[in-house]
Image (cartoon, rainbow, N blue to C red):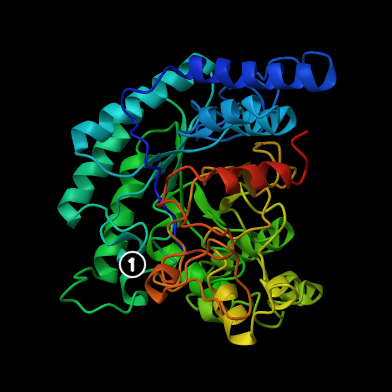
């Protein structure tokens, strides 16, 4: 999976209160014209009604108020365009989406720059009396040098960057989503020659261990490590990687960042990982030091058949022994309201795409898939003891990248279906996304068509 950074600069942004006033005003104006009455302005506690408080030492506890950052670059312009087109309902949907708590990504810069940027976000969150969700995304060799390539150049550079990131938080409360994809796509998983990709798994683990130590030194910070998602790594494999990265010294792990897996599956998957961690670290358990003994979504369950997942739950019920699961997790629900797109609709009329195309589209269904909706709104009141929060980590409305045949995530038989104005040369078709009928925006850029569809298809509804 790929996790693109935001393309907007983080320095020089408007104050959080200005962004919140914009979103509130846009919602109110559009709703007033549509419904004949003005809705109450969205408050800084859009996810929960409770104030921040300090119920626990770490970043998240039930009732925590989550930070609403200023609108994403491109969102205000889309709302204005919709209002000018008299599409008041959709303008209100985009505005409501922007008035919902979501993460702030930090993806580059010198140590001094990232420290200043984090400090600015912390100050904005203080205005709202809210806890921010911060994404640290600068690990060397990130994204296997693909759509979201970049990051620090060396272990020493990264340690300096993450230390400055931690200093920017200071002694305030924050949630840190630490390096999306870093454990799912280890350097050895990238399959690239060392001549062009000189990063190692050993360095990756050292980098994450250092980051956990630096961030968790602040008692107000809850750092979460990459736990991939329920359609990716097995429970045992994920447990092994998390333990190597010192998940037991972190707040826990996160699931589904920038992906689309259904929430019920993610709840099971996260619970099983926590169970597996408990089993393999308990000297009295038969699975001690053997994460490969842990059941998963692949066995005895069948990953594609959720009705079988009870078999894996039964395994843990029968085999936990004295082990007690204590490792917490969070779930990104920013785009999983409709689950993953299996692309089978494109096999039907009028598209009539062959099986080979459908297979390629399905394998790339993480990249700007159509027919997706926002999922559960962010909240720290989950009702699940080990689940700290539902969060919007991926910024809704930002592109995953230029999803096309050149990038290996699209295929299309133009002889079976095309439209007037679509490219006719192989070179142009190679850069075209037939699922949207456009050349997709670059990673992190605002994608108005996708933003609107996410808001329209939100489950539960934004309206």
Label 1 belongs to which residue?
144
Give the residue drawn at x 72%, y 27%: 88
- Residue 234 seen in the current view: no
Provide residue 285's location: percent of width, then percent of height: 59, 74
Which residue is rendered at x = 29% and y = 63% of the image?
204
Is residue 52 positioned above or below 222 on the image? above
Specify the quadrant that holds the C terminus: top right
Q: Nearer the viewer, residue 226 or 396?
A: 396
**Name of the residue lying farthest toward the front:** 420
Residue located 37% across and 72% down the image:
427
**Does any portion of residue 176 appear in the rendered image?**
yes
Q: Quadrant of residue 164?
A: top left
- 267 or 313, which is in the foreground? 267
**Image position, residue 109 (x, y; %):** 23, 40
Which of these two is toward me, 418 or 377? Answer: 418
The vertical placement of 438 against 99, above or below, is below
Q: Position of residue 403 (x, y in %)?
A: 47, 63
For this view, does 219 lie left or right of residue 139? right
Task: Categorize mark 1 by other alpha carbons within 10 Å: few (<14), some (14-19), many (20+).
Answer: many
In the image, 68: left or right of 248?
Answer: right
* Residue at the right extreme of this rendering: 36
Please tell me how many numbered marks the rendered image carries. Answer: 1
Q: In which quarter of the image is residue 336?
A: bottom right
Q: Where is residue 92 in the image (x, y as percent from the top left)?
A: 69, 28
Look at the numbered disc 1 and give the secondary structure of its residue: helix
Q: Name the residue rendered at 32%, 76% in the picture.
A: 188
Q: Nearer the viewer, residue 343 or 5?
A: 343
């Amino acid at each position: 999976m790929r996790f693109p950074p935001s393309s907007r600069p983080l320095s020089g942004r408007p104050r959080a209160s200005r962004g919140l006033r914009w979103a509130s005003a846009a919602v109110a104006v559009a709703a007033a014209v549509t419904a004949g009455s003005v809705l109450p302005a969205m408050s800084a506690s859009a996810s929960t009604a409770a104030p921040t408080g300090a119920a626990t030492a770490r970043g998240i506890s039930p009732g925590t108020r989550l930070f609403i950052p200023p609108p994403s670059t491109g969102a205000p312009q889309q709302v204005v365009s919709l209002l000018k087109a008299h599409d008041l309902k959709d303008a209100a949907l985009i505005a409501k989406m922007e008035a919902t708590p979501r993460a702030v990504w930090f993806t580059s810069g010198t140590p001094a720059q990232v420290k200043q940027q984090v400090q600015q976000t912390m100050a904005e969150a203080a205005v709202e009396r809210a806890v921010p969700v911060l994404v640290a995304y600068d690990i060397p060799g990130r994204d296997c040098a693909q759509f979201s390539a970049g990051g620090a150049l060396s272990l020493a550079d990264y340690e300096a960057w993450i230390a400055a990131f931690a200093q920017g938080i200071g002694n305030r409360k924050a949630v840190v989503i630490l390096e999306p994809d870093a454990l799912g796509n280890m350097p050895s998983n990238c399959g690239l020659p060392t001549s062009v990709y000189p990063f190692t798994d050993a360095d990756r683990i050292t980098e994450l261990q250092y980051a956990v130590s630096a961030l968790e030194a602040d008692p107000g910070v809850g750092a979460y490590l990459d736990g991939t998602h329920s359609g990716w790594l097995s429970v045992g494999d994920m447990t092994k990687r998390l333990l190597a990265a010192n998940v037991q010294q972190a707040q826990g792990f996160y699931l589904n960042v920038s992906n689309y897996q259904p929430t019920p599956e993610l709840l099971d998957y996260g619970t099983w990982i926590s169970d597996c961690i408990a089993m393999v670290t308990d000297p009295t358990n038969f699975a001690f030091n053997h994460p490969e003994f842990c059941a998963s979504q692949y066995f005895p369950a069948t990953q594609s058949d959720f009705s079988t997942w009870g078999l894996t739950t039964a395994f843990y019920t029968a085999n936990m022994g004295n082990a007690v699961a204590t490792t917490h997790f969070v779930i990104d629900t920013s785009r999983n309201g409709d689950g993953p797109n299996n692309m089978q609709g494109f096999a039907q009329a009028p598209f009539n795409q062959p099986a080979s195309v459908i297979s390629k589209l399905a394998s790339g269904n993480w990249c700007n898939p159509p027919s997706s909706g926002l999922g559960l709104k962010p909240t720290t009141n989950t009702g699940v003891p080990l689940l700290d929060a539902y969060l919007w980590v991926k910024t809704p409305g930002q592109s995953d990248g230029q999803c096309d045949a050149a990038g290996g995530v699209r295929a299309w038989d133009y002889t079976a279906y095309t439209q007037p104005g679509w490219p006719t040369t192989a070179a142009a078709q190679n850069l075209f996304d037939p699922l949207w009928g456009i050349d997709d925006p670059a990673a992190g850029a605002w994608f108005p068509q996708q933003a609107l569809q996410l808001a329209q298809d939100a489950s539960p509804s934004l309206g």
